[in-house]
Image (cartoon, helix red, strand yellow):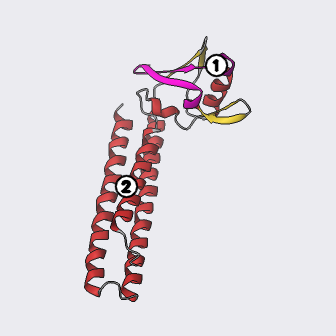
Amino acid sequence: MAKYDKADIERRMQGAIDSLKGDLSGLRTGRANTSLLDPVVVEVYGSMMPLNQVATVSAPEPRMLSVQVWDKANVTAVEKGIAKANLGLNPMIDGQNVRLPMPDLTEERRKDLAKLAGQYAEQSKIAIRNVRRDGMEALKEDEKKKEISEDERKRFEDEVQKLTDKYVGEADQAAQAKEKEIMTQ
């Protein structure tokens, strides 16, 4: 049976792009974005839980996040979890809510965030190229086993390269859009 599977290669490359978009959405711009708190984990009931499992996060204003904690006993744990996440936010307790005003970004912080967006894109492109390498190796194995001809292998290699170029381009576009958003907000 042939090892080469174009659908699997495309799925894995798309997974790298989806992961990149998730990473980029967690980068802070000047606007309040609920996905900013996705990496926050809170110690409640003796275990570590994602913030979205103990509270509702909303953005009532463009420069404010609000965290509605479901159990009043967990309010201080949520505050500590947000502070520990090192997002540059200053949580303020307001009853059963934790309010997070978004401070203005300094020019230096903007440049750091833009650089980080570029690093995320580079990691994504490396993952895409690794998938390409796996696809090329699978094609060579299939040719050795006489499951495909040399012409078929070359045609499939062109397909894999076109997919690679497409997804690397998507990664670059996503990173450039995020860098522009960071620098202009």
For the N terminus, the quadrant is bottom left
- Residue extending farthest to the top is 95
Which stretch did the figure color magenta? 52-75
The quadrant of the rendering that contains the C terminus is top left
Please state which of residues 182 and 155 is positioned toward the viewer in this rendering. Answer: 155
Q: What residue type is labelled 1?
A: Asp
Q: Mark 1 points at which residue?
A: 71
Q: What SS does tag 1 mark?
A: loop
In the rendered image, the vertical position of residue 40 relative to residue 144, given as above or below: above
Q: Which residue is drawn at 25% across and 84% down?
A: 151
Which residue is pictured at 34% across the width and 47% down the height? 174
The residue that mark 2 highlights is 14
Q: Residue 131 carries which label?
A: none
Distance from label 2 to label 1 (Cα)?
A: 38 Å
Q: Residues within 10 Å of mark 2 (few under 14, many from 20)?
A: some
As drawn, 152 above or below 6: below
